Image (cartoon, grey):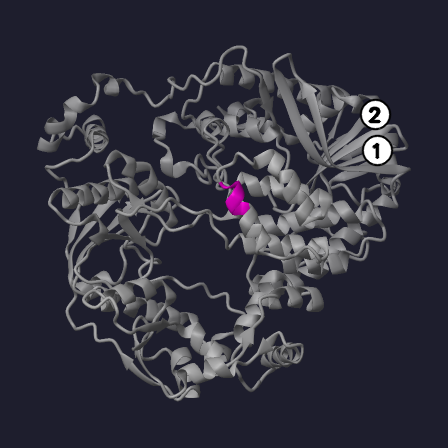
Amino acid sequence: MLIIAPRNMHIDIINYYRKDNPFFDIKVIDKNDLVAASSYISKDDTVLYMMNFYHYSYDEANTYLSFIKTSFTPNNPKLEKLYKLQQQLVESAHLYKSDVHYLLFKNKIALVIGYQKYDNELLNLSKLLDMKLEFFDYGNEYKVNEINSFTRLEDEVYFVLNEIAHDIDNGVDINDIYIFNRNEEYIYYLKSFVTSFGFNINFPNSYSFVKTGVYSEFKKLFEKTKSVTESLEKLEEICQDDDIYHQFVEAVNKINVEELDYEIASIYLEKELAKHFVEEPHYLNAVKLISEPTLLLNKKIYVLGFVQGHFPKSQKDDSYLNEGELIYVNKLTNKLKTKIDQDNLLDFFKQDNTFVLSYANKSLTSAKMIVSPLLAYLSLKENKNPFKKYFYSEDVLKYIACSLKDLNVLYKEKSSKYFATKDLVESTYNSFDNSFKGAHVFNKNSPLRLSTTQLTDYASCPFKYYLGNVLELDPFEETIDSIFGNIVHHLLEKSLTNDKYDVSSNYDKLVNESNVSEEIKILWSLNLKDQIMNMIKYIKLHNRYMKNPSFELEKRIDIKLNELTLLTGRIDKMVILDNKSLVMIDYKTGSSGDFDETYLKDGLSSQLPTYALLAKESEYCKYSLSGLYINHIYTSKEVELKEDELIPKYLRLSGKSLDDYSSFFNFDSTIASGKSSFVASISLKEEVLQSKNNSVISKEKLDEYIKVVKDKYLEVSELIRANRFDISPCDKGKPNSRACQYCSYRDICYVRANQVRYLSSPKEEENE
């Protein structure tokens, strides 16, 4: 019997058909096997060859390869490019056909499970092989019994684990219990909570090697030695006691890059290791965790996170080919992939199993989740926050007791459930005042390392500092903007120190190697490249109007504020002029971030004064500080250069200039004409610098900034040592500066309206 099914279903299909006869003759293949039989097969090193020979990025090579294994006739330039690449790879023997594979499936009859009758990829492949397809009959009735909804994701996980414990207690074989999950966030909670219930879950291998400390150490060694073999030898001295060391070495040895140039080898190695996972412990008797529909019979299946976007999967529209081109080459469109996933799920729910669906309204990473639209097909009524009379974990019961006491304290609710559980939680529960005084992590002798980012975090909200810098919860997610910002910073650093640096080709290289979709890469290449090239040209143009400049880029400076407090900062650009004066510049790819002295006393807008403090109390004190500036290096608006301008308006530096004409002239000699071309709002009258927005300051004013910011660092360091981490967000009263508006921790914070601090400007205070 020949069966065509997705690979994740193969073991379950074999068990399904061999449950009565363990010797039942069955062969299970997937769609990729039909591609190999009817079209082209690629060699193991084809992606590497494409990177090396054609200079494609890893992602480009994989994308192109996914489209050129099947035969097609091109009808536009994009498909012509793919067709030409296909023929070249055939000529170099990196793509080839196998008569053996062809004969294995030619004229065969196959049962199809897990693919739909309208799957154009499958239908086209079967025609090429003259195969007859029969589709598995799932029946007509859905076997879903209930759906439970919960306020929070944690409640949902506790409920499901408690139900599984109840099933096992009632005699259900643990090997007949499954959890269907598509959201990585649930994995964390399942692993954290299952230990309270006395049974095991077999988790899939999902933790990539590139996220491990072993890889981090290997990467440093490989960057230094440029040799995989030598790096692995030295790695043994560092990581041989690490639990995953031997797994990691085995994975690396399977990826042969020793003979390649380091640049290509390092990229390829990292991308391939990202597809290798640390082995999870596997138990003989355990609940099984699945993420795709499969073929099961008489099982108990709990479906977690039944929400929009996961059931069915929301496909991203980031394919290299558009929908018309995908249809032309017999590939699935994103719309069709979503429909296939939906129908596969509905077929799954028709099998003779017991299904229990659940979802939560809120999670840590999503403020609001919406139940799947498939609920309309299943015609189920929600059972909200079910409360059971049986509990298999005291931790669960205490958790529920706390949530009920929350309702009592906040809203005076006193349900029967509240009275049944209230004694499980100590009476001191009511003394909680939202100030986190119990966080005794520092003492008066604790050393601290602070930066302007940490000062801003604490000044914005002490609790935010606690979450990010004490608990080390990292909310950072790499975005398209942050990736592009890193590219621009890299180009600036290299081009300003090396006149021969090829900005154009390196821009193309960095864009191609970036972890974004092909559409974004095209957008950056077509729409933004000229702006970035011109931006660097204009910034370098400024150098011609400086007197004997020398540059230090990405310079880190550390100073001691006192015996226990170290202040650290990394300055994007430092300009030393005529070996006498110093200018410090911070690059920003966004439009915000200008210095506003109004909020300096509150610990905000501290970056430029911090730079001044670092200069004054470090080896750079020998230079006269003459300017502190922000350089906005990118704009989304259309750039216009007027006839009397040397650079576009958006590129002019903003910040503070010392009222010393000679020092400023050394930095920008265009001031001699009466107006600065490179610094915003600075003009000259009778050899006196002037500005309309107080951007020219005296040395005394600069010293005042330095004193205020230093005192603030010392004040905050003492508050941190005193473990003062109150929830106390500040609100500037401006549209984009509202309290908690962009805080990464807002979903796990219990801020109350009366805890918000409203900051006011001097003008507002005068009016009062």
Kindly identify the residue that appears in the image at 78 percent across and 44 percent down: 678
* Amino acid found under the numbered disc labelled 2: Tyr
Is 488 on the left-hand or right-hand side of 293?
Answer: right
Counting from the top left corner in percent of width and height, residue 238 is at 60, 34
Kindly identify the residue that appears in the image at 25 percent across and 20 percent down: 429
Q: Residue furthest left?
A: 416
In the depicted structure, whether residue 386 falls above or below residue 92 = above
Determine whether the residue tagged by mark 1 lies in a helix, strand or loop: strand
Counting from the top left corner in percent of width and height, residue 539 is at 78, 48
* Amino acid found under the numbered disc labelled 1: Ile
Residue 639 shows in this picture: no
Q: In the rendered structure, which segment of residues is drawn in magenta?
A: 244-248
Is 21 on the left-hand or right-hand side of 317?
Answer: left
Q: Nearer the viewer, residue 757 or 683?
A: 757
Q: Nearer the viewer, residue 194 or 234?
A: 234
Q: Quadrant of residue 381?
A: bottom left
Kindly identify the residue that appears in the image at 74 percent across and 40 percent down: 681
Please name the residue that numbered disc 1 is placed on: 576
First of labels 2, 1 by sequence position: 1
Residue 247 is inside the magenta segment? yes
Is 690 on the left-hand or right-hand side of 332?
Answer: right
Residue 428 is inside the magenta segment? no
Number of residues whose C-alpha sits closer than 10 Å to that of mark 1, classed few (under 14), some (14–19) or many (20 or more): many
Counting from the top left corner in percent of width and height, residue 757 is at 44, 26
Q: Nearer the viewer, residue 398 or 642?
A: 398
Secondary structure of the magenta portion, mostly? helix
Please name the residue that numbered disc 2 is placed on: 623
Is 303 on the left-hand or right-hand side of 123?
Answer: left
Counting from the top left corner in percent of width and height, residue 164 is at 19, 45
Q: Quadrant of the N terminus?
A: bottom left
2 and 1 marks in contact (CB < 8 Å): yes
In the depicted structure, whether residue 548 falls above or below residue 484 = above
